Amino acid sequence: MTLESGAMARITERLADLASGAFLTQAVVTAKTALSAHFVRVDLRSDRFRSASWTPGCKVQLRTDRGQMTMRTYTPFAWDPAEGAVSLVAYLHGTGPAARWFDRVKPGDPCELLGPRRSIDLTGVGSRVLFLGDETSVGLAAVLGQTPGVTFVLEAADPAEYTEVLAALGVTATVVPKTADRRDLLAAARPDAYDLVVTGDAATVGPVRRDARDWTPAPGKVFGKAYWAEGRTGLD
Ligand SMILES: Cc1cc2nc3c(=O)[nH]c(=O)nc-3n(C[C@H](O)[C@H](O)[C@H](O)COP(=O)(O)OP(=O)(O)OC[C@H]3O[C@@H](n4cnc5c(N)ncnc54)[C@H](O)[C@@H]3O)c2cc1C
């Protein structure tokens, strides 16, 4: 790096920090709990959260690194407007910016984020729901965990680990091994008169939505959103 390009890089970093200070919500990490080898829960607090509009399925986007504008998306749950508190749960895979952020962050650390913002909106979801997803659907599952009438069927690389993590978050789920043909997920028992919620791997969400057109009984409303895709970073 030349002296000139080094100075430019520092100016760009400084601008990113200034823009973040102006536009992002400033929160603080109040707790971090390892739920298993691959899942971590982080609790956040901010005065801005008191007046925020939390809806089931909304998202927040974390700024993962100072000096950059890299953002990664997570699903808030357990929000408490009175306390200005909210929680996130992350599936840690690989060494992407969010995986590194969740790994290194500790209570007392600052956290900058956008949101809550609208994503999949489950406000109008019916009283019976078939919820399909994967490890990245963990936050959304935690949002619906206590809702009666939701059947959770999730695919995972390690079903036993994910079953325990979900149970710790108050979600009773059937977790099936992830397979290329999604056979176990597609074979999930369908309740009568239900809405379908499907999130997670883009390679699952698309095929499930297409397959669902031929299901009997057919789903009422379908809520679908890909949360990640092989070879793509920060999909949103
Ligand atoms: C609306 C929305 C809500 C979301 N909510 C949650 C949530 O509550 N909890 C949660 O854990 N995730 C959630 N995600 C998914 C999360 O944003 C992605 O997994 C994100 O890519 C993680 O960022 P990263 O920096 O660790 O990896 P990236 O830098 O984005 O990706 C690095 C590499 O890992 C791959 N990759 C990304 N995700 C996975 C995965 N799950 N399994 C295997 N490989 C993967 C990418 O394809 C890429 O090759 C959500 C996404 C969206 C869009």
Image (cartoon, helix red, strand yellow):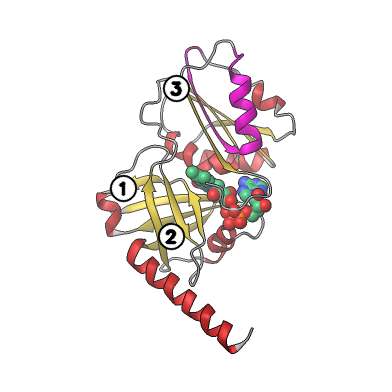
Residue at horizontal 59 percent and vertical 19 percent from the top: 212
Residue type indicated by callout 2: Ala
Of 231 and 145, the residue lying toward us: 231
Task: State the image coordinates of residue 205 (x, y, percent, origin top left).
Answer: 60, 32
Picture quadrant where residue 55 is located: top left
- The residues colored magenta run 192-215
| Disc 2 residue: CB within 8 Å of ligand 1 | no
Q: Mark 2 or mark 1: which is in front?
A: 1
Instruction: Tell me if residue 140 comes above or below residue 217 in the rendering.
Output: below
Helix, strand or loop under label 2: strand
Residue type indicated by callout 1: Asp
First in sequence: mark 3 or mark 2?
2
Task: State the image coordinates of residue 213 (x, y, percent, origin top left).
Answer: 58, 17
Q: Real-space Cα distance between discs 3 and 2?
A: 31 Å
Dot 3: few (<14), some (14–19), or many (≥20) neighbours within 10 Å? some
Q: Real-space Cα distance between discs 2 and 1?
A: 15 Å
Residue at horizontal 61 percent and vertical 14 percent from the top: 214
Report the number of discs.
Answer: 3
Dot 2: few (<14), some (14–19), or many (≥20) neighbours within 10 Å? some
Q: Mark 3 points at which residue?
A: 149
Residue type indicated by callout 3: Gly
Residue 92 in view here: no
Q: Mark 2 points at which residue?
A: 31
Of 123 and 28, the residue lying toward us: 123
Q: Mark 1 points at which residue?
A: 80
